[in-house]
Image (cartoon, rainbow, N blue to C red):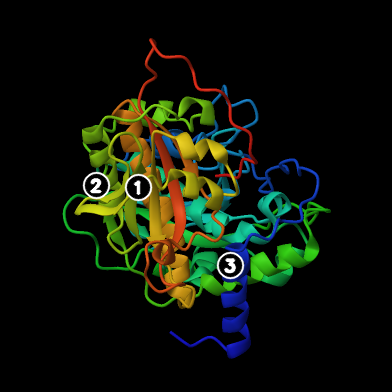
Amino acid sequence: MTHAPPAVSGLLSRALADARSPRVPLTVPYLPERAFPWGEPGLHPAGAGGGVDLDRVLRLSLAAPRSAGGRLRPVASAGALHPVRAHLLVGPGCSLPPGRYAYDPRSHRAHPCGRAPADAPPGAVVVLTVTAARTVAHYGHRAWPLLLLDAGHAAAAVALAAAPGDVRVSLDVDGEELSAAAGLPRAAEWKRRTEPELPLAAVWLPSVQGPIPSTAPLAAWTALPCAVAPLPQPGADNAPPRELAAARHLLTYLAAGTDPTWHPAARPAPVTDETLRTRRSAPPSDLAHPPAPDLLARVLAIAEGARPDGPAWASAVGGDAPGLLTTAGLLASGDARPTLAQWAAGQRWIGTAGAVLVAHGCPADSPPSLIRGSHLAAGYAAGVAQAHATALGLRSRPIGSWQQADLGAALGDAPGHDWIVHGLALAGPADPTLPAPPPLPGKEERP
């Protein structure tokens, strides 16, 4: 991989420090969701029988629930900002005819965007992109790490829905390669039409049994030209122009990669299709009851094992034996939850949450690949852990925005080397014999 020019590298390190700083974002009035920009008539993803049932996969992962009330997904973005979009590269052996498609989660339709190459590998690749304007409008300079986290959650949702099966996930695939494979416009063409979609991750769903084909899943697709352009949508860039441009620039730079790695994905044993249909991010008022220690330990182990290449995980608990726990044992004594509440944009409810899982690592001087990988992998692991928690009867809520959360320094280590990048609040069922906890004020920063 080529090294970043000093100016770009310096911009990235300053942007990471700024996102972690206590500076309050400059936001604009809430931006409504824009119309779906891919205008070809959509196809229902359930069709002829095949090895990959895209109807099922998309319904269980990205489709908007009919009772969503304006939300696109129940997770990860508890704020319903839903910046992630999906493009489908469909080869033989799927419930859609071979070709390129853009997926509309509201209508649950796949909109044709071009033909498939003659040598397309069997199965489908789901390319995950993000649009930045609405998240930047809400979170300002803190938005770009949240977009990475949300893309990681979406990758986990697709992988969980596709399992059991031989599913592969890449969080380091090159963004330009993903754009070319999906037939997305070049940067200048986006500006003339609508808000750019920035590719960050991909999920590969082979339709063949046995060994995975040796052919790279994207190679055949990248040779095809862009066949369909998005519909023009004037006024898509209503977020603060400077911060929006910075977020797009950073995400484009972070998406640069080398040869992708495709990690196998699995669904934890208790998770069923019904789990994926019913999972929701719980409101803060429902998260004050401690989960059973054995269930908490199981969810923590799932978070740690979901992406071994990602950041480490620990859980903060209160009660009679407060502490910060890992699967290997006690990391620190004392109740860390009030401090976590201050670090998570002052959300005071976190101080009384049943338990709080935190992903930590990503030093201040991390290279671009580690910054991208840490956030995508943390989002992915939190998505898997949240599904597992749901299957165990636990309530949960992702916590995405963290400021001054230098966990290593708080534990007496050198500053700047061990930062919290994501969190997941957990709680057990409410005890009907106890009064409900009073609501706690404090700005709610999400996902």
Identify the image quadrant of the C terminus: top right
Instruction: Give the CA separation, mark 3 to mark 1.
Output: 37 Å
Q: Mark 2 sits on what residue?
A: 301
Q: Residue at x 40, y 70 (%)?
A: 219
Image coordinates for residue 304, horizontal then vertical, percent: 28, 53
In the rendered image, the quadrant that contains the N terminus is: bottom left
List the residue tagged with mark 1. Answer: 334
- Choose the circle earlier in sequence order: 3 or 1: 3
Q: Is residue 134 above or below residue 444?
A: below
In this picture, residue 265 sits left or right of residue 96? left
Element at badge 3?
helix
Whether pointer 2 and pointer 3 mark residues with C-beta atoms closer than 8 Å, the reply is: no
Q: Nearer the viewer, residue 281 or 200?
A: 281
Q: CA distance from mark 2 to mark 1?
A: 21 Å
Disc on the earlier residue, 2 or 3:
3
Circle 1 SS class:
loop
- SS assignment at label 2: helix
Q: Residues within 10 Å of mark 1 (few under 14, many from 20)?
A: some
The answer to which image quadrant residue 190 occupies is bottom right
Residue at x-position 71% and y-position 56%: 25
Q: Residues within 10 Å of mark 2 (few under 14, many from 20)?
A: some
Q: Which residue is mark 3?
A: 251
| Vertical position of residue 358 compared to residue 373: above or below | above
Residue that appears at 71% across and 41% down? 33
Q: Is residue 423 above or below residue 351?
A: below
**Residue 257 visible (yes or no):** yes
Give the x, y percent position of residue 147: 56, 55
Amino acid type of disc 3? Leu
Q: Amino acid at mark 2?
A: Ala
